[in-house]
Amino acid sequence: MINWNEILQRSNGQNLPPDQRVEKTPEQWKQELDEETFYVTRQKGTEHPFSSSMCGLFKPGLYRCACCGTPLFNANEKFDSGTGWPSFTQPVADNAVDYIGDASHGMQRIETTCSSCDAHLGHVFPDGPPPTGLRYCINAVSLKRDGDD
Ligand SMILES: [Zn+2]
């Protein structure tokens, strides 16, 4: 099971190879995605907290990357963090998410991206509930729920 030390290690250039790679130019992504999804996923933006009803949604289901459709998180690992962003204790597969050190905005954080297409998802923090003690704080627009189109 993934833990914070492992994440720190991976963020040091040791991410696992993904099952598949999806590579497109910024222009191609801009054509395929709506404006906010493009801003958050391809330009590392952050949506406003509590901007999505996805935060309070806990019915079973799979959350995929909004850009490339790769499964990223399972509703079983979703919890109510009270932050206003969808929050998970772990990704659906060990190699689904990449970890990158992020020193922007005067903070030392670990950014999470889709390992298949490099979409910005959000950040991960070591203050989550069991079993991992991790909190994956993810922008709702970076995710697409199966069955919710
Ligand atoms: Zn992706």
Image (spheres, grey):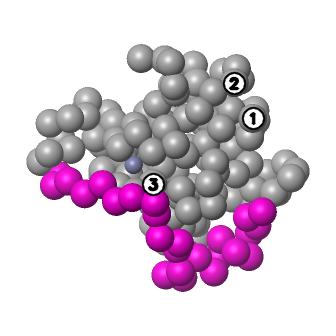
Q: Which residue is mark 3?
A: 114
The residue mark sitting in front, 2 or 3, is 2
- Please state which amino acid type lies under the numbered disc 1: Asn
Question: Relative to 5, is 44 above or below?
Answer: above
The magenta segment is 1-26
Q: Residues within 10 Å of mark 3 (few under 14, many from 20)?
A: many
Question: Relative to 112, is 39 above or below?
Answer: above
Give 103 or 111, whichever is nearer the viewer.
111
- Please state which amino acid type lies under the numbered disc 2: Pro
Q: Earlier in the sequence, mark 2 or mark 3?
A: 2
Q: Which residue is mark 1?
A: 76
Q: Earlier in the sequence, mark 1 or mark 2?
A: 2
Left or right of residue 20: residue 146: right
As for residue 119 lying within the magenta part, the answer is no
Q: Which residue is mark 2?
A: 60
Left or right of residue 32: residue 78: right
Residues at discs 1 and 2 in contact (Cβ within 8 Å): yes
Q: Secondary structure at mark 1?
A: helix
Question: Relative to 81, is 5 above or below?
Answer: below
Give 64 or 120, whichever is nearer the viewer.
64
